[in-house]
Structure formats: structure tokens, C-alpha cells
Image (cartoon, rainbow, N blue to C red):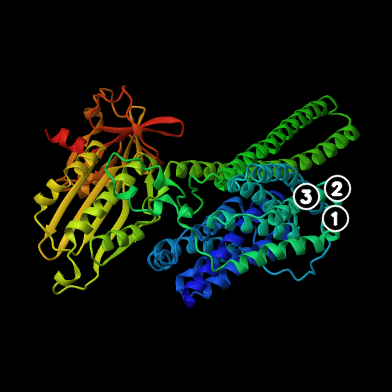
Amino acid sequence: MSNIEQHIENFKETCRRHCDIIETCLLDYEKYRIAELLANTANSINQIRLSAKKLSVDNAAIIADAMLKVVSLAKENRLDLLPNDIDLILRANDFYYSIIQFSAYEILELLNSEFAIISEIAAELQSIAAPQRIKKVQSTVVKSETTSDEQQSKGILLEKFKYAIVRSVSTIEQVLEQSETQKEAIDVVPISQALNTIKGAAISAGVSKAFDLADAMGDFIRFLAENNVPINPYQMDLLLSCNRLFKEIAATSAIAIIDKIKDYSDYIDTYSDFLRSFLTEQEHLQPTPSAKLASDEIVPLISTVGASSDAASDGKLYYFGYKSSQLNDYSKYNRLLDATINIISNIVPISSSINNLKSLKSLIRQIQLDNNNILYNITNTEVLTEIAMNNAKKLEEIISQLDFHFATADEFLQNIKNRINTIYNGLYNFRSVAFGDVVRGYNELANDLARYSSKNVNLKITGRFVRVGSELYTLLEILLPQLLRDIIINNIEPPNLRKGKPEVAEISLSARTLSSKLLIEIIDDGKGVDASAISARLEGLINLISNNSGRIDISSEPNFGTKLSISFNMNYVLLKSLVFEVAGNLYAVQLLNCEALIDEKTFHKQHSNAKSIDMRKILGVEAEYIGKNKPVLLVNDFNGNIALIFDKFVGEAELVPTPANKLVSVTPFIAASSVYNNKPVMIIDVQKLLNISVN
């Protein structure tokens, strides 16, 4: 193994070990605000950062540097981490988490080619540590004693750790005993889930010894499964002994767990060392053929269009927290669940604040009665003075309470909005997958196809992090391998025939989104043939694309290569739009189609020759306009700008489109419908509208 490959493997192992710690500690810090959790987080980020720097790839450590700066400022109490800030750090952490499932070659390609994504994440993290948010360094000495709230929170985390052990050890014991009695391989998934539960609770509770033991057990079991290494009776007894040790730890009260861990410290170290030493001794072992994933084999990928894609979908990647279909990946789901619980918990103090405001209102009523009393005692100055002084105190107290409760309610309302946005974005992303999930293993596939046809090929993939609608996933799994196979077999020349070209042929596969479309391009530098011949050869795939509301354009030039441009409509995207009102109904125009938004007076002064379309006339509204100076939207057209005149401009919005319902489908230029501020909004297809108005 070369030096760079060794550094990459160390980098992957560091990410595998520390990304879990970062996620668990941040999620628990969000709940309990214990400073020690930030110290654990900063330490793990630094480990990833140092490992990334050893790769000597400039882009590897950019995100880790930004993460460490934010968490370090929060640890020093110079920055308050808001829920949205924590979500951004977790998204950055998921970037490193995704590294685990790449090959060494793909990691280098990803770090070198996805600079835009890396820069975007780093910029978002840097915005958290903006100068206006950083507090000045306090001159007072920080007390080392923990507050009663922190102590109580630590007690909760220890209880949580105890419960995690109780919940997990029975699963581990059952799976191990079943494997032992039935003489079959260990079922890795439930044991890994149970050990991950223990590890997460252990790191949050500050019980590092328990984390090390669970981590060593997990590595040991995973290694046996991946390499088809049979487990001997001694090793089985050792795993059961480790599990019984966790049982003993959980048998005590939460408050005494730390002491219990110290009592068993030597046993834990011994067990962990043995498991680790076994892995060190076995590093030279290579996976046996039966341990390979089916997705690495060539046969299912180049089979007929109707072949099942189940095998190719195993072990998919995930990017930036958008998890794959692996059974043990629940972190994104749990994060959404935590966000939901936070919203519910914020409703309680808001309700309390509203009740307090109601009680203040009754106090004001009492003061009004006192003022009426003044009128009845107008001749008695002593009574007047006493009532006036009491009322002044009451009013001062009410004003201060009103200020407090309004500020509190405002803060909680903002927090609820932030959490709802988090959940919305999370659920939105569940409707899509990363393009990298679709093309996983394609570099190996291209190499296999090239060897099969005695050719040299370099496949370059860009846009791995472009989101693809889940409804297109299965289609692309079938389509793209077939196109790649056709290009390599039929378009690329053998090395001895590539005159005037490099011996290694270049194929680029890229994905990007534009408005509501997914655009995929495949470009090669092969021999180039007549486009009609390619169309005839790919007739079955072209029909498949057309039947799924897609389009393919083929261009080819002799000796220079071929370009395939494929586009699909996607229904999961957010359409950035401008929303308008016409006769009380809402309509939206995609921002992509807009040139300018002006008022009617400006339009007549500056664009007197431009054609205008009265939306009331197009929609058949007979009533008069309410406003005099109406909003005018200039939209794109091949013959110049055309103006759409509406009643009122409502605002800018990101809309999730759905097919237009039956009530509006009779209007031919309505492309889709959506919801804006709990009201229905109809999305206008500008090109259809212009065609109708011209005719």
C-alpha cells in the first residue's frame, strides 16, 4: 500500500470513529447545554482535521477548520450556538461521514472536483462565526464548578446511558447465542445498532471507557463479517463476557455508574486491547469473493433493461445527512424526531407566557377600578395619594413583566420557526437522493467494461451532490449503466486506433439542475458516428426516457466524439417564484422567467413599445381593478420583453409544485398548483401563456 493510500485509509477510519461522536455530542448539547460536550466535539473535529491535513489535499481540511473555529468559540462561551447553527455543523459533519463509503480513488476525486460544495459549506459555517455574533472576552474568572442545572443534565445523560445499555445488551446476547447454537454467521446489523446506541450514550455521558469497549466490539464483529472469518469458541466467550460486563455496569444506579466503570477499568482495557490486537494481526487478510457486494459485479449492471436493480441498490451512499437505505442509518430520522420534540417543548412556555399576559390584563382591569375609586374619593387627598402611589407601582411592575413575557414569547416563536424549517428541509430532502448514490461504483464499472473490450478509459463524474428526485432513481439505475456500456463498447476506439489522441479515452458524466429539470450530460472523445445511427442503436433506451417524460438529444462529430444530453422534469424541487394576486386569487411566476418587476407608470414611461398582457382579461375577470398603479412583471420572450399586469404583488416564495387540480386544469397555461401562506396558488407556465396571448 502506498503512502497516500495509507493516509486515505487512516482518514476514513478517523471519520468513521469521530463523526458519530460529533453528531451525538452536538445533538445532546442542543438539549442539555453541557459545556463538556462541546469539548468532546472539538477534540473529534480536530482529529479529523489533523488526519485530513496529512492527505496533502488542500480541500480536505477546509470544512474541518471552519467547524473547529465555530465549536471552539462556543466552548469558550464567546458564541451562542442556535439550533440552525448546530444543524449546519451536523451537515458539515455528514460530508466527512460520507467519506467512509468511498474508495481511495473516489475520495481524491471528490475532494479535488467538488470544491464548490466544500466552499459553500465552509462559507455557511463562517457565517455562524460572524464578527457581530462573537462576544467580547470577559475579564472575570470563569468558575470551574458546574451549576445545579448542569449537574441535573449530567444525571439525565447517565440515566440515558444506563437505559441504552439495558435496551441493547439483551439484543447482543440473543444474536450471539443464536449464532453459537445454530453454527451460523453473526447477524451484524442488530448488534451494530445496539453497540452504536451504547457508544452514543456513553460519549454524551462522558464514559469514555464504555465507548472504547463498544467501539472495539463493533470493529471486531464488522471485521469478521466483511472478511468471512469464522469466530472460534474463545472469541465468542470473549464477546459474551464483554456483554455481561455492560450488564454489570447497568445493574447499579445511574449516580454510581462512574465508580462502577472505575472498578471494572482493568477488565475493560483487557477486553478492548485483545479485540484491537486481533484486528491488527489480521490486517493483511483480503475479503473473500463471497464477501463482495453484488453492486461491484459487472453482470447485473449490463443486463437487459428489464433486469432487477435490487442488487445494485445495496449499500448506497449518503451525502450531508441525507441517509441511504442501509438498515442501521437512522441518524437523520432521529434528528428530525428531536426537532419535532423541541417544537412541542417550546409550545409549553409560549402557552405559559400567554396565560401570564392574560393575568396582567386582569391586573390592568383592577387598576381601572382603582381609578374609578379615585373619582368617588375626590375630596379625600390621603386616599387619593395612596391609590395613586399603589397604581404607579403596579403599572411599573406590569410594564416590566409585559416586556419580559413579550420578549420570551418572541424568542420561543422564532425558535419554533427555525425548528419547523429544519423539519421541512429534512422531509424535503427525503424525497430525493444524491446523484452520487446513483453512480456509485461507476468508475469500477467503466474499468471493467474497458478491460472487457480491450480499451483504456478514464471516467470523470461531476455533480455527485446534485439532488435527484426519488421517482427517477430506479430509472437512472437502469438507464445510465446501459448508456455507459454502449459508449465504451461502440464509441471508444482501441488505443492503437486513437490517432492524434491520448491512449486513455476521456468520458465525462455530469449532473446539474435547472429550474424544475434534471440535466445529465455524457460526453466522450471517441470516434464519433452519425447521430441517427446512435439513435437506432439506443432506440430502446430512448423510448424508456420518453415514456418517463424525459428527453434525449444526441450530437456527434467524426473523430471528436459524442455528446448525450438527457433531461427530466422533477416534481420535488422548490420553485423560486414571485407571487401575485388577481381578483383575490394567487398566481405565481418562476423567478427564472422574470426580467424585472416595476409599477405601471414606470412601464409606460420606459417600455412604451413593449407588448402588455392584462391578466384579468386572460383570466376572464370582469370586475374593475382596485389599485390604480398596478404591478407589472416583465417576462422573457424570444421577441423581447412582454409585460404581465396583475392586481397586486404579494411577495417572493419557494413553492413546492404539485400537478394542477381539476378545477384549474381547464386553464391551459396553469402548469402546477402549490400553497402559499395556507392559500392555494397557481403556477403559470409563461411560455404557454405567451403562445395563447399571441394566437
Residue at x-position 56% and y-position 60% = 128
- Which numbered marker is on residue 475? none
Q: What secondary structure is found at the residue carrying circle 3?
A: helix
Q: Nearer the viewer, mark 2 or mark 3?
A: 3
Q: What secondary structure is found at the residue carrying circle 1?
A: helix
**Based on the displayed image, in which of its 4 quarters is residue 587 positioned?**
top left
Residue 25, above or below 547: below
The quarter in which the C terminus is drawn is top left
Amino acid type assigned to the residue bearing label 1 in the image: Lys
Q: Earlier in the sequence, mark 1 or mark 3?
A: 3
- Which numbered marker is on residue 244? 3
Residue at x-position 19% and y-position 70% = 495
Q: Are marks 1 and 3 in contact (CB under 8 Å)?
A: no
Q: In this view of the protein, which residue sits in the foreground, 682 or 109?
A: 109
Q: Nearer the viewer, mark 1 or mark 3?
A: 3
Q: Is residue 77 visible?
A: no
Residue 501 image position (x, y, % from top left): 17, 73
Residue annotated with mark 2 = 252
Q: What secondary structure is found at the residue carrying circle 2?
A: loop
- Which numbered marker is on residue 260? 1
Q: Earlier in the sequence, mark 1 or mark 2?
A: 2
Q: Are marks 1 and 2 in contact (CB under 8 Å)?
A: yes
Going by the image, does 567 lie left or right of 8? left
Residue 491 image position (x, y, % from top left): 17, 59
Q: Earlier in the sequence, mark 2 or mark 3?
A: 3
Amino acid type assigned to the residue bearing label 3 in the image: Arg
Amino acid type assigned to the residue bearing label 2 in the image: Thr
Residue 399 image position (x, y, % from top left): 73, 42
**Based on the displayed image, in which of its 4 quarters is residue 500 positioned?**
bottom left
Residue 8, above or below 425: below
Inter-mark Cα distance, 1 to 3? 14 Å
